[in-house]
Image (spheres, rainbow, N blue to C red):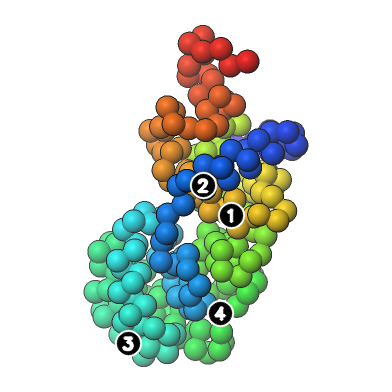
Amino acid sequence: MPIDVYPVSQELAVYLRKKLLAWEQNNYPAFPWRDEIPPFHALVAEVLLQRTRAEQVVPVYLNFVRVFPNPASLAQTNIPDIEKVIAPLGLRWRARFLHELGKELVADGSVPANLVSLRKLSGVGPYAASAYLSFHVGRRVPIVDSNVVRFYGRFFGFRTGPETRRDRQLLDLADSIMPKRAFKRFNYALIDFTRAICRPKPLHDICPVAKRCAFYRERFRGEFNFT
């Protein structure tokens, strides 16, 4: 479905950046994969985080990198052993992809640092590849998952669907809002905010961007003075 809000005004882009970065200063969660960690651990974390709540991933991630500290240890194990480690997350089918990932990284010798090569690895989807590059390599790459799509759809007032996160216009929109320098901080702010505040049932009362949000303004039309 078409997204007809791009390009956004510079004023609105600056507004979103400032509001989300300010919110993040007081709401930054200290997840273990946000420390300085080996590239293999970082990639595993982003793979486990795909379509899974971060809070659920924490204990599984910590146990995973303890049991499989490097690609060789992952490649040399068997799939049932991987299934046992990731079982608390459900989605045991990911064990096969993780096993293949370990073998591929052993063959390659290192975790690649470009989007095309990352996407060729088993189990590494668009979100995991972009998140790895932004958070662990320091590349300016937009982060777009289902939560981010929901937020942008609500804020700008366009309809979204299962394939919106792959829409070129949506990716251009995300890129135009992301700052040139503080992109890593902004991407963390964006995924944290969309997880904590702009939920399926949004927390309007504590949302710092509610008064500029199309969804909020439409829902509460006439109840507030938005000027």
Residue 42 seen anywhere in this rendered image of the structure: yes
The tag earlier along the polypeptide, 2 or 3, is: 2
The tag earlier along the polypeptide, 1 or 3, is: 3
Quadrant for the N terminus in the image: top right
Task: Determine whether 113 is above or below 20 in the image.
Answer: below
In this view, the mark in front (2 or 3): 2
In this view, the mark in front (1 or 3): 1
Residue 132, horizontal then vertical, whole percent: 55, 66
What amino acid does circle 4 point to?
A: Val
Asked if the residue at tag 4 contacts the one at tag 1, i.e. Cβ–Cβ closer than 8 Å, the answer is no
* Foreground pick, 114 / 91: 114
Crowding at mark 1 (Cα within 10 Å: few <14, some 14-19, many 20+): some
Residue shown at 56% from the left, 64% from the top: 135
Write down the residue under mark 4: 111
Element at label 3: loop
Residue shown at 48% from the left, 11% from the top: 223
Task: Determine whether 219 is above or below 32 in the image.
Answer: above
Q: Residue reaching furthest front?
A: 26
Asked if the residue at tag 3 contacts the one at tag 1, i.e. Cβ–Cβ closer than 8 Å, the answer is no
- Which label is found at residue 24? 2
What amino acid does circle 2 point to?
A: Glu
Residue 102, horizontal then vertical, whole percent: 44, 82
Residue shown at 44% from the left, 72% from the top: 44
In this view, the mark in front (2 or 4): 2
What amino acid does circle 3 point to?
A: Thr
Write down the residue under mark 3: 77
The tag earlier along the polypeptide, 2 or 4, is: 2
The tag earlier along the polypeptide, 2 or 1, is: 2
The tag earlier along the polypeptide, 3 or 4, is: 3
The tag earlier along the polypeptide, 1 or 4, is: 4
